Image: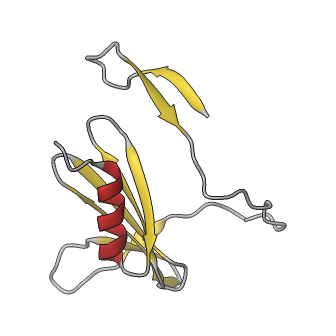
Amino acid sequence: MTLRVIAPSPHSTEISDMRDAHSKTLPKPSRKSIRWTSFIASPRRGRAVRGLEEEGNPKHRVRVEHNRDTLLVHISGENGDGWTTLAIDRATREWSIAQRPRQLDAASAAYSGLYSEEG
């Protein structure tokens, strides 16, 4: 589905396309979740915390990286196997997503899907 919306920048009156997407539709879970919860930071010895983990399931992790142009959101599998990475262009909010067994491979694929070689 494509929606026409006002660009989020307060300095722009340009109309941009925003898209929703999904891999495949699944049946709704049969049980009601009690509540939404958040990932938590797990303190590391003498270093800044760079990742988050699910409370009670430290193998399920999330990490966000960024540079001036791009955000990378890395999400591990529930048991720590495999990675899903979402790459977002900071200026336009265009995005790309990839899944791979290794975090670096998922990040590389998502980044490559976001940006063309010309640029």
Q: Residue at x 62, y 60 (%)?
A: 36
Q: Residue furthest front?
A: 118
Is 21 placed left or right of 105 in the picture? right
State the residue in front, 113 or 64.
113
State the residue in front, 108 or 63.
108
Quadrant of res 118: top left
Which quarter shows the C terminus? top left
Q: Can residue 72 be seen in this view?
A: no
Give the x, y percent position of residue 108.
29, 66
Labels in figure, total: 0
Q: Residue furthest top?
A: 13
Quadrant of res 106: bottom left
State the residue in front, 54 or 66.
66
Q: Residue at x 29, y 44 (%)?
A: 89
Q: Can residue 57 be seen in this view?
A: yes
Q: Residue at x 60, y 52 (%)?
A: 22
Give the x, y percent position of residue 10.
30, 19
Q: In this view, does 65 lie above or below 92?
A: below
Q: Is residue 84 above or below residue 12?
A: below
Give the x, y percent position of residue 49.
25, 73
Give the x, y percent position of residue 57.
52, 83
Which quarter shows the N terminus? top right
Q: Which residue is drawn at 35% across and 79% down?
A: 42
State the residue in front, 83 or 50.
83
Is 82 placed left or right of 9 in the picture? right
Q: Which residue lies furthest to the right in this view?
A: 30
